[in-house]
Amino acid sequence: MSSIISNQIEEIKIFISSNSKTDQSLGYSTLLHFQEQSSDSPPSIQALIQSSRCLINSIVSDIHNEDEEIAAQALKCLGFMIYHPSLVATIPAEDGKRVLESLAKLITFTKMKSVCNLGVWCISIQQFDATLLAACFDTLLQAVVHALDNPIGSLSTTFEAMQAVAKLAAQMSEMMRESSHLWVPPIYRRLLSIDKRERDMSERCLLKIRPTILPPSISLSKAIIEDMREKLLTGMKDWLDKGMKVQTVQAWGWFICFLGSGALKNRHLVNDMLKVLEQTFSDHNPQVQIASLVAWQGLIDALVHPQILSCKKNRIQQLQTSPGKSSELVLNGFSKSLKLAVASLIGIISSKCDVSVLLSCLNTWCYLLHKLDIFVNSPSVINVVLDPMFQAIFKIGPDSKNCISTKCSDLNSDPKNQVNLHLSARTFIPGSGRYSWNQYPIKWLPWDLSQLDFYLKMISIIITHVATATAAPESKKSVCDAAVRIFRFVLKGVQMEFRNPSNNYDNIMFCLNTILSFMKKLGEDASSDGGGDLFNTSLYLIEATMEELEPSIMESPLYKVALDISYVGSLDSVKHSKIPHRCSFMDMFSPMVYLTVLYLGLVVQLTLNTPEMELILQRLQRFYKFVLSSDDPLESFLASVGFLYAHMGFKYMEIWMVMVTCLNGCIDGMKDLSLFKTDSDNSFHRAICHLLSYPFILFSCAKKDITLLRASNSPKEAFVLSERKLEQAIEVWKSLYGSVCVACLKSSATNTFSHDLCAMLNSCFGGNGSMFQYNSELGYKDLELACLSFSGKVLVCILEQKLASDTIGREFVGVCNESSGINNIFVFASRVMKFMYVNMGREPASGLVSSRVFSTLTCFISCLHSKQDILSFFEIISGPLLQWLSHQEIKDENAKDQLGILWAESLNCLQRSQPLLTFDSSFLGLQASLLEKTLDHPNTSVSDPTIIFWNSTYGKQISLEYPQNLLHVLHRLSRNGRISLYNRSKSFVARCSTLEHDTVTTPWCCKITPTQKSSKRVELTEEGMIPGSNQNNKPPSNSKRKRVELTEHQKEVRRAHQGRERDCNGHGPGVRTYTNLDFSQGNQESQDSQGIQDSEAMLEMLRRVG
C-alpha cells in the first residue's frame, strides 16, 4: 500500500513540475483529490508530510501563475496544506513565512477575483502559530485591509476578508486591537450599504470580533469620530429621510459603541447622534422602537466599560482620602452619563407601547445593570439607575396583554460571600406560549442593611399598582407572587443581620420597625380597598415574615414595638371595659404579637360572605397554628383572645372556631404542660376560659348582632347554614374542653378548670338574664333555640368530662366537711335547666336537649356522697327542678321519663348522704314545695319514688310539724294508705310497746320539745336521727330514771320553738329557724346575681341540719 501511495505522490510531483499547463492542471486536480481522500488515511497523510516541502515550493510558485485555473487549483491545495494540523506542524518557519508573504502579495496585486478570494480564504483557514503570524502581521493586515476595501467590487471577496479578520482577531487579539483603526472602519462603513447582504456580513463580523475591539482603542475612536463628521452622520440622516429607520438605528448602535471614551469628549457629536434616536424612539412601529433599544446598548457600552469603571473606583478612593472639586466633578460626570442612559428607557417603559417593546426596554436596562458590574450596589447608582426605573416598571402593572414579573435567585446565607443574583423580567405573549429574554448576570454585593428601605419601597410599588390595575386575575396573581418572593429574599437578608453577633440593638430595632411599618401600611391600604389582591398579598407578607425571621427576635421581650395599627386605635374609641387581655393602641408588644394582631385585623375587616372566605379561613388556621407552635406563644394567644373579644357578633364565630381548633391541636401536641398550672396568676388558664366563653357572650349580648341568621333573603337557608356551623362550633368546643381537662389533670394535682369555666359561664348568663325571656314579637326564636342547643350540649360535655376524670371519685367521697368545688357546675346546670324550661316544647330539638341534660345530670349526681355537695345540689337545682316538676304537660316523652329518673336519683342522694341527713321538720319545710308537687304527681315515675322516699324517711319520724302546703296532699295520700304518718293517738305505753316489737333495732331516746307558754312535749325519737349521737356505743336510755342531755342541735330547736311566733311567719311551729332560704322558692334572678357568696352562706346554715 505504501508503495502505491508513494508512486502516486511522485506522479503528482512530476505533473505539477511540468511546463505543460495540461499536465499542471491534471497534477493539481489529482493532488486535490488525493488530499481529500487522505483525511481518513494516515498513510496518505504521512506521504504528504514527507513530500510537503517539495509540494509547497511548487504550489507557492504556481499561485502566481497567470493561468487562473492553475492558480486557483494551487491555492486550493495550499489551503489544505496550511489548514491540516498534521501538515502545518511539519512546515518549517521559513516555508510558512514564505507562504504567508506570497499570499499577501497575491491578494494585493492580483486582478483575478477568484484568485483573490482563494488567497484571502487561505488566510482565513490557516492554522499557523501566533509567532509566525506576528512576524508577518503587517503584510497580512495590509492584504486583508486591501481585500476589505475590495477594489475589485466583489461581495465574495469582502466576505472572505471579513472571515480572515475574524480569524486573525482570534489568533492575535492584542495586535489586532492595536491596529483596529486600520481594519475596523472598512467594516463598519458597510453598515450603511444599500446592499442588505453587505450590511448583514458586516454586522456578523462585528459581532464576532466585538470582544477584541470593544471597548474601542483611542485610535479607533478617533477614526469613527472623523468618519461620523465626514459622512456617517449625514448618511444616517439620509436613511431616516428614506424611511430606512431600522437599518439606521442598527448602524447607529455600532457607531456609538466605537466612540467609547471619545463620546464623553465629543458631546456635540453625541448630541447630534442622539437626535437620530429621538425620531426612532417616538416611532409607532414596534420594530423601530425595539431596534432603537438594542442600539441603545451601544451607548451603554460607550458610557460604561471597564476602563471607566476602574477610573471611577480610583476617583472614589481619592474622594474618600482627599476630597476635592476635581474628584466630585468626575463623579458627577459619571452620574450624568448614567442619567442619560436611563432617561430614554424610563420614557419608553412609561409610555403605552407594545409588549415586545417593553421587553426590549427591560432587556436593555438589565444590560446596563450588568455593565455596571459591582458598582450597581453604589448608592448613587441605585438612586439614578435602579430607583426611578423600578418605579416606572412597577407602575406599568399587568394588563390583559402582558405580565411583567421580577425574579431573583436565592440569597447566599453566608454574608461573607458575594451574592450573585440574576435579575430578569419575562413577558408572556399570548398565543406564542414562549418567553423571550436575555439573561444578564448582575453582581450584587452581600446584603447591606442600608438598602432595606429601597427594597421595601420597590415591593410596595409593585403590590399597590397591581392592586389598582385592570388585568386578568392570573396575570395579577403572577406579579403578586413575584413580589412576595422578592420580599422573602429581602427577609433572608434581614435574617442574616439578626444572626450577626456584631449587630447592635439599634440595627435590629431599625429592621423590625422598618418591616412592620411597611406591612402596616400595606395592611391599612388593603383594609380601605376592601379585599382583593392587596388583601391577599398583605396576608402572604405577614406569613412570610413569621416564617423567615428569627423566632428568638420576634418573640423576645427585649425588642418590643408600639402597636400603632390604626384599626386597633379605632377599637379603642369604643368603650370595652370588660374585654379580657385587651391590646390597646400604642401599647408595647413583641413583633410576633404585632403581626398576629395585624393579621387578625385584616381577616375581621374582610367581608365574611365573600366567595374566598373559606380559603381565607384555611389560611388563618395555618397562620394561627404557626403562631401557637412558636417557642413562647402565650403573649400572642392572650392578645388574640383579647382582640376577638373586641368583636362581638356571630359573623366572627368562624374566626373563633379557627382559634379553638388550632389551640386544641397545639395542646394535644404540647409536651411542656407548665402553662396549665392553676396558680393564682395563670393568665393562660383564664384566657382559655374566656375563649370557651365567647359563644355564650355572643348569645347573651345585644340582639342586634344576630346578622348570621338574618343575612340571607331566605331565612330558612340562613338557619340551615347557621345550624351546620353551630354543630361545628359545639364539636370544636367539646374537643378543646376535653384536651384542656386532660392537660390540667396531668399538670396539677387539683383540677379546677371546669369550676372556673362554669363560674365564667354563669356570669355570661347572669349578666343578661333578659336574653332568655322569650318574646315572640321580637322574632328571636332561632337565636334562642341555638343558644339552648349550644348550652345544653356544653353542659352535657362538662358533666361527662367530670364523671370521666380520674379525680372525681376522690372529690366526691373524700372529706365531707370540705367543699368539692362543684357549686359553679350546679349553678350552670340550674341556669341551663331554667332556660330549657322557658323554651320547652317549641321545637323537637329542645326536647332532645332536655332529655340529654336530665340523663347526664342523673349520672352525675349518682356519684354524689358528700352531704355538703348534696345539700348544695338541692339548694341550687331546686328552683328549676320545681318548675319542671310542676309542669304537667311535657310533650316530649323521653324528656318526661328522664325527668322522673333525675328526681328519683335526687331523692336517693338524700338518703345516702355522708354524714346522714336529719329528716326532721326543718328539713321537711325546705322540701315542702317539691314534695307537694311530686307526692301526688300524675306521672308515676315521679310520684312512686317520692312516696317510697317519704315512707323511708319522714314517714318513720315520731314527731313532725307538717307545713301548711303539704296538709292536703298528705291527707289524701294517707287516707288512701299510700304514705305512712306516725299515729299520735296511741298511748305512750302502746307506742312504746309498738316500738319494742318494731323490727328496727335502732336505739331510741327521749326528745323534749318546748311548747307554748310553759308546757313541754316529751317524745321518743330515733337516736340515729340526732346528729352527734353514737349509735354503736350508746345503749338505749331510760327516760324515767335518767335526765336527758340535750345536744347543740336540740338546744337550737328549743330556742326555735320558743321564738316560733317571730320566726316561722305562719308556716308552722319551729320549722324556719335553720335558714332563711327555702328549696321550694327556687332561684330568683335576684338570688342569681348574688353569686356564690349567698350559696356559701346557705351551706353554712344547712350544716346545722346534721
Image (cartoon, rainbow, N blue to C red):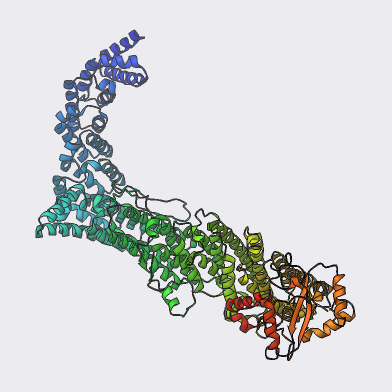
Q: Seen in the image, is 538 located left or right of residue 985?
A: left
Q: Where does the image place residue 863, in percent across and percent down from the top left?
A: 70, 64
Residue farthest to the top, as pictured: 3
Q: Nearer the viewer, residue 936 or 1037?
A: 1037
Q: Nearer the viewer, residue 481 or 154?
A: 481
Residue under the image location 63 percent in, 73 percent down:
828
Query: Can residue 702 be seen at all in this image of the molecule?
Result: yes
Q: Where does the image place residue 306, in percent across and percent down from the top left?
A: 20, 47
Q: Where does the image place residue 468, in percent across and percent down from the top left?
A: 42, 68
Q: Quadrant of the C terminus?
A: bottom right
Residue farthest to the front, as pictured: 1041
Asked if residue 180 is positioned above or below residue 287 in the image, the reply reads above
Q: Nearer the viewer, residue 965 or 149?
A: 965
Q: Seen in the image, is 753 located left or right of residue 789?
A: left
Q: Where does the image place residue 496, in percent across and percent down from the top left?
A: 33, 52
Q: Nearer the viewer, residue 943 or 435?
A: 943
Residue under the image location 19 percent in, 21 percent down:
61
Query: Can residue 282 be seen at all in this image of the molecule?
Result: no
Count of marks overlaid on the render: 0
